[in-house]
Amino acid sequence: MTLITRRRTLQGLAGIAAVSALGAPSILRAADTIKLGFLSGLTGLETILGETQLHCFELAVEELNAANGIGGRKIEYVVEDDQTTTRGAIEKARKLVFEDEVVATMGMIASLEHVAARSVTSPANHILMYSTYYEGGVCEKSFFSTGQVPNQQIVPSLGWLTKNTGKTVYVIGSDYIWPRNSTEVIRTEIEKLGGKLLGAEFAPFGTQDFAPIFDRARAANPDFIWMMVAGADVITALKQYQSFGFKQQLFSNALDELFSFAHPELTAGTLSNQAYFMKLDTPRNKVFTEAFARKYGADKPINAIGEAAYDGVYLYAAAVEKAGSTDSDAVIKALREVEFEAPQGNVNFAANNCLRANSILARGTPDGHWETVENFGQIDPDVPGCTL
């Protein structure tokens, strides 16, 4: 396996180390550029997440271009806003693949985006790299996930919660594929642990009144509450949740620094599980957070979705160098053979095209950061029945 250590990054430059003793074949011509696509919800429900995801993507591209690009070829990119809609994701994916002719597309927040985009990219054998934790289950040759899948996020969190808070849970989520499919994982896994899902409710995007849902959750009296309300809607939900005076532990894998920096009063005491938190104390993360602060401002937070987007650019770059080509089949093969020294630690793809990622359970603090409760370490991703 090829390890990209980015020693030059630690010296103030970011780059790709040589990926093969044989070097890159001549097909990588320095006079050419490599064009990437970025697709995400930059307006609409997921604006707060899409903007940071784009910033981390751009930072990785800028660092690579400052250090000889990919095999001497500079990276250019096209940004498209799908407005967090199915129609937008399909239309913009078509534009990126067939009009802009990008060699790979990265980004996306809501699962409805990757589902829609894949209807375009998978038949075209076009690499789609999704950087948000999600419900899992996708097994497609050209689809790569740099975010957590359920066995890296939901399963270890449930183990801790049932051991430390109790064995009954009530789920509150947005009404789309990520919360619904994730709830089925929760139902199955908590029953394995001798517990029970007491109820699950899913609110439409843009819901302003969560009171009826919270009334039913309080009546069920679970040991803990699991919230998967998406995007800006989670702020509305959290404000109303506090007014109900719940005493149960709240867990939400929808929460991270982008919400806690803006509303620490809502996230303090809440638990979340992510592959990355800004306060990870490693030399590599220090370089990453300092570079981000220089470019976008010291007051701008980074979250796991953004870090995963940053990782995706570097992993793709390493794979192209190893393959000596941007041909999809060659790069897909190489993506499973390269490794990257990421801010969260050394990462690489498993045979199912999902990242071997961290699993960190953390509690929100009054200053908007997240304090580690338990670090489960790096976990191999599981996509049941997937053979690629």
Image (cartoon, grey):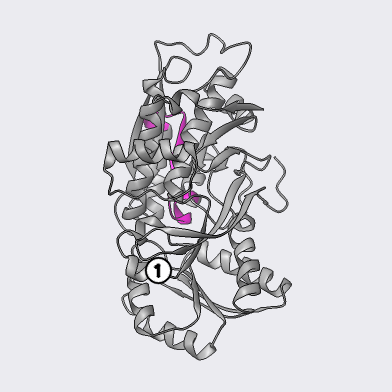
Q: Is residue 187 left or right of residue 35?
A: right
What percent of the width, then of the height, locates residue 296? 27, 41
Residue 371, can we see it? yes
Pick out the residue farthest to the top.
26
Residue at 37% in and 73% down: 238
What percent of the width, then of the height, locates residue 113? 44, 51
Location of residue 128 with respect to 324 vertically, above or below: below
Residue at 32% in and 47% down: 51
Residue at 43% in and 34% down: 97
Residue where numbered disc 1 is placed:
268
Span colored in magenta? 98-114
What percent of the width, then of the height, locates residue 317? 50, 26
Give the quadrant of the C terminus.
top right
What percent of the width, then of the height, locates residue 310? 44, 38
| Magenta highlight on residue 210 | no
Q: In the figure, residue 56 lies in which quadrant?
A: top left
